[in-house]
Amino acid sequence: MATYKPRVISLTKRPGQTFGFFLRTEQTEEGHLIRSLEMGGQAELAGFKDGDRILRINGTFVDGLSHLEVVELVQNSGTSVTFHILDEASYKQAKEQGVNLCGPQSAPLVNGAATQDLKPKLCYLLKSKKGYGFAFCSVKGKQGLFMTEVIPGSVADRAGVKAKDRLVEVNGENVEDSTHDQVADKIKLAGDSLMLLLVDAETDRYYQNRHMKIRAWLATTKHLPHKPRIIEMTKRSDGYGFVLKQEPRQTGHFINDIDRGSPADRAGLKKMDRLVAVDGKEVDNWSHKQVVGRIKQSGNECCLLVVDKDTDQMYKQGNVSPMLFWGEIKEFNSPPSYIEAINLPVNLCGPQSAPLVNGAATIDKPPSTPAQEREEALKPKLCKMKKTTAGYGFHLSGIQGVQGQYISEVVTGGAADKAGLEDDDIVVEVNGVNVEQSSHEEVVAMIHRGGSSLEMLVAKKNVYDQLKAKEEANTRLLLGEASYVDVHTADSPDTRRENRHKVEARPQTPPRPARRRTSSVSSSSSNDSFDIRF
């Protein structure tokens, strides 16, 4: 009988990002399938293939588990997970031959629903007159230092510290190999506050069995006293009503000059809040211009993650990003079902708006746009790019089997970004072929066939919708007079530039009926399938 050797692939992502694939079960197929790989995503680059079957997750055999149990295992792995993968043909052959794919070394499944809580924890302590209210010691036969004598009602007790918790980090510094005296000195030198990374016995065993190192970015933030704030705003005709600035002696982007009664004011934005993320994209390392550009791309609705001074100081003390909070909040938000996803309209870009920024920094009172300029803006854009080692740097989003695709998750500085692609752009043509009537799978195949080069005709959603309303086809002829087009190219490593290339005029793009789309980050289910994106 033939033997089958699975591929072992480890994936790591940053908080708030995805692994770049859908985990799917289908009535007509056995096993847990890999589907809809993100081009240039972690999974594709690591060697995942469409139709691959997942056999193990962090050592746990999953072929006989339910879809939801497998999803839970991946989610509880945090930002790093190891898969045992078998290709589709080998999997089906093994099933036909009755091969035991589990083997003798399968790891046990973690106890039911309790796996939801198997995370290390961050605990923030502010010393009182009576001290912190805990002690720690070494335990014979065990490596590390463990909490003991946690006084009920003390600072430590209220912060979530429990007896027998193992100490992993003190103020962002790993102490697993430190002596008792060394850790005691660190705590004394820390002053009146501590950020501790702790792990209880069950969680410790879970990570050790999977040979996973415990780090702060795997932890839960539920015990922390200060919370980042999610600010959701809808823009008025005079803007959001705040100014974004960079302080000369501070790192980061800060909120300033909030107009009373403005969307920013009503949403709870405060002066000197530090901006952490825009629409789920962390902006710590972005330039001021990039952050402003990202807010402009949001259209009429924008979601900001911000921290006040105390929250910022607390996270920095633990050397961990507030994006950890964002990722945890998103984990607990139940995604819509497949039917809900199809029938719920998603505002991907919103109506065309006037420029967001007035001058270099203000985001409150944008100048009006003349009607003539709005009319001239009603045209698509042609973007040319070459694949790098990191791929094209964007995600093609849509619903499998449903016509129509749009761009999402454009990587800043990537090939797509430099070529002019933006989040929520509607895809009209791929390499000169109209794809408005094509399925997601067909468009992906066209892109793959293009090799390392890609040419896309896209339009902003508001432009696309207005052209459809005017019954005007989206074609290259809208780009300029005669047979010339404006082309965004990724040739320059530092800046976007426009070149003009002569091309043959192509037939007009046939109109297609309006449809409703759903974001690619939601999970999907139907009578014959169930999938979720990671």
Image: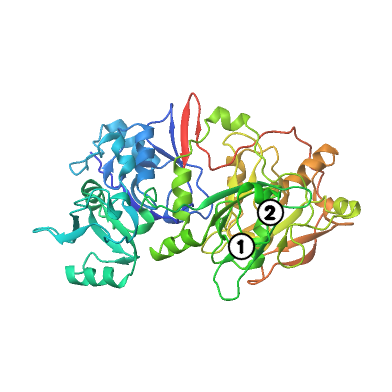
In this view, the residue in front, 91 or 173, is 173
Q: Position of residue 404 (x, y in %)?
A: 66, 39
Which residue lies at the image location 85% right of the left edge and 41% below the top edge?
Answer: 472
Q: Position of residue 446 (x, y in %)?
A: 62, 47
Residue 96 lies in quadrant? top left
In this view, the residue in front, 113 or 519, is 113
Residue 461 lies in quadrant? top right
Circle 1 is placed at which residue position? 415
521 shown above or below 14? above
* Quadrant for the N terminus in the image: top left
Q: CA distance from mark 2 to mark 1?
A: 18 Å
Q: Disc 2, disc 1: CB below 8 Å?
A: no
Select label 2 or label 1 by which is in front.
2
Q: Residue furthest front?
A: 129
In this view, the residue in front, 188 or 415, is 188
> Callout 1: few (<14), some (14-19), or many (20+) C-alpha neighbours within 10 Å?
many
* Quadrant for the C terminus in the image: top left
Circle 2 is placed at which residue position? 297
Which residue lies at the image location 64% right of the left edge and 42% below the top edge?
Answer: 405
